[in-house]
Amino acid sequence: MFAPRLALLSAMNARAMLAFGLLLLAVGAQADELPVATLQATPAQIESLPAEVSLTLTIPANHHAYMDEGDDGLYIPVGVDTDTLASGGIEATVLQAPKGVRDDEVKAVVLRGTAIFKLSLAAQPGKTVAAGDFAIPVNIQMCNDRSHVCYMPDMVEAHVTLTNAASNGSASSSVAPPITAEEEDIPLMTRLTNLYQENAQNIWFSFFLMLVAGLLSTATPCVYPMLPITSAILMQRGGGDRKAGLRHALTYAVGIILTYFLLGLIAGLTGGALNTLMQSAWVNLGFGLFFAFFGLALLGFYEMAILQDKTGELDQKSEQVGGLFGTLMMGMVAGLVISPCVGPIVFALLLQVADAIAQLANAAAAAGQVLSFWDQFAISLKGGLMMAGFGVGIGVPFFIVGLIKVRPPRPGTWMEKVKYGFGLLILYFGYIYFSKGMGVAGVEEGVTLGIVVGLVALWIAIVHMNVFAKVEDDAMPQDKLRKFGGVVVGLIGAYYLVAGFAQSGLILPKPQPMVVAGAAGAQGDIEEHDGILWHRTIEGALAEAKKTGKPIFIDFYAAWCANCKEFAHQAGSDPVLRQILNQDAVPLRLVDKEADFLRFQNDPQYRELKTGLPFFVVLDPNGNFVWKGTDYKAVALMRDAVARAAGH
């Protein structure tokens, strides 16, 4: 009687043991497949302490880590284990940590993908750190986004090699805590430096501005009359049915938006290459002349119909394609070159989008982000979204006119004013790029302005005042007066033009800045600009710093960098900045392509120099790194950095 039951229990126990064994195997197999985060230090080798190190934490796909304990205090946040470093005699200060993104599902701030920590490392007071390898540990807990399984807390390490032993006999570390300038004193651009890392790059305001530009573009004389005509054609393609006509109108608008989205995406993808090209004087001058040509066309000096025949052929072919697809093609063709009025506006906006996307990529690189192709593509999508706003601005009026079946306001002189407004705006773009090109060629901004004034004066004299037209003896007095005024304006223009080119250095050698013998003698010269004596070599600045006990403030400069010139102007006008450079620090200006500039550029610690300018560095009197930044308006941060470097 009991034998069958015992046999049954034995069988059940065997099955339970087998299931338990399979469970152990599954757990073991899962343990082999546990996600692994990686941590990399940059630079991986440092000569001495103090030094700054960036830690790149890469979290596996479909996983996240935590930056706080969560609303319920259940999670272990990511953090650098400074206690372990302290046990080895290293004092670590977290200068910058990723802020993460709030995830309402897990009720915590999380990290995904790649994140950057920046540390300052120094020997503890009274301690000596031996040369060799040491590990920087980071505590982390990860969870799976798909299975929602959270793993045991773990530790990842990055290894750094210290070339020379370091010690600190002072009462406090020579690398001070992070900058403590008042939050309201920190300019907006400083906070935006970390925009990529914080995922805070909001482009909706840019989208809105593009939308407004698109709406204004439809108010130009060569687009506005097309609204009722195009609406009628679209309704006809709907076979007279109102709902079908509205579908065609909507599809037409989508085609326009799609074209501008693709153009913006292309501009974003080429932003980095364009950023490199824009360091060429000839490229900038070419863009300046290009915009001047289009701006004058919008002002009505001549007609411009580039590619209009080809566009007309495309439009006719697209009209022959039936259905919504044909309407979509019509919209895309219209968006490609909708009219001579909008073409130059689109090109100007595309150039601005490419420049903006290049700045986003540079900001990401400056924040220490390692950008993959898909990261770059994601950034470029923002360019597509920005130009899609322009497409919405153009496409929506076509749809609305067909939707509500009302006649738009009658055309009039107000359209010409909108057109002229765009013409003046594009002429301004032309001046900006012309000025930048002359700056890259080494021409001072005031000289460039004089050349432009001369060109404008000659244009007025020749085109508007007909200075070369013959005036008959019996001409009206006002005609003779106009001729006389044209001669005067022409002479003024010729004077400014000739004098400008004479001082530009493009024809004759331009005057050199005042150079005085440096305190370091043969070690380097000093240039005077706006009352500030700038050292021009790192050796001369170091000698002066050691002699006076002042820190070194380095301004990395290039003629093609507009914000570098803004900082140079600010240095001569801002009283706080003037005091920093004239009294509190040894000012050093290193110019693009020079040996000392390249020396810093090739140092991984200053990798921002490979992405763009401006860039500023503060060193202590012994040449040790203290601070770096890219915001030329961050005077409060510069002041605090110099004070820290001086030991105040």
Image (cartoon, rainbow, N blue to C red):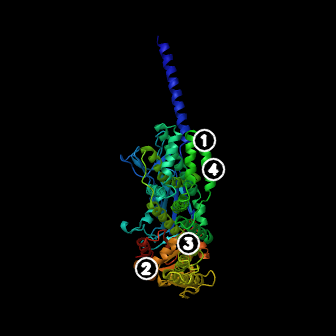
Q: CA distance from mark 2 to mark 3?
A: 22 Å
Asked which quadrant contains residue 323, the reply is top right
Above or below, comparing residue 202 to residue 173 in the picture: above
> In front of the other: label 2 or label 1?
1
Camera-nearest label, 4 or 2 = 4
Amino acid type of the residue that numbered disc 2 sits on in the rendered structure = Ser
Badge 1 local density, few (<14 within 10 Å), some, or many (20+)?
some
Front tag of 3 and 4: 4
Dot 4, how many residues are within 10 Å of its Cα: few (below 14), some (14-19), or many (20+)? few
Q: Are marks 2 and 3 in contact (CB under 8 Å)?
A: no
The secondary element bearing badge 3 is classed as helix
**Which label's residue is closer to the chain start, 2 or 1?**
1
Q: CA distance from mark 4 to mark 1?
A: 13 Å
- Whole-percent x, y for residue 376 in the image: 56, 55
On the image, numbered disc 3 is attached to which residue?
436
Q: CA distance from mark 3 to mark 4?
A: 39 Å
Which residue occupies the extreme front position in the image? Answer: 474
Query: Which mark, residue 313?
Result: 4
Q: Earlier in the sequence, mark 4 or mark 1?
A: 4
**Is disc 3 in contact with disc 4, using a CB cutoff of under 8 Å?**
no
Amino acid at pointer 3: Lys
| Mark 2 / mark 3, whichever is N-terminal | 3
The image's mark for residue 573 is 2
Using the image, tell me which numbered label, if any, was put on residue 433.
Answer: none
Numbered mark located on residue 321 in the image: 1
Q: Which kind of residue does numbered mark 4 sit on?
A: Glu
Label 3 CA crowd tier, 10 Å (few <14, some 14–19, many 20+) = many
Give the SS element for disc 1. Answer: loop
Element at label 4: helix
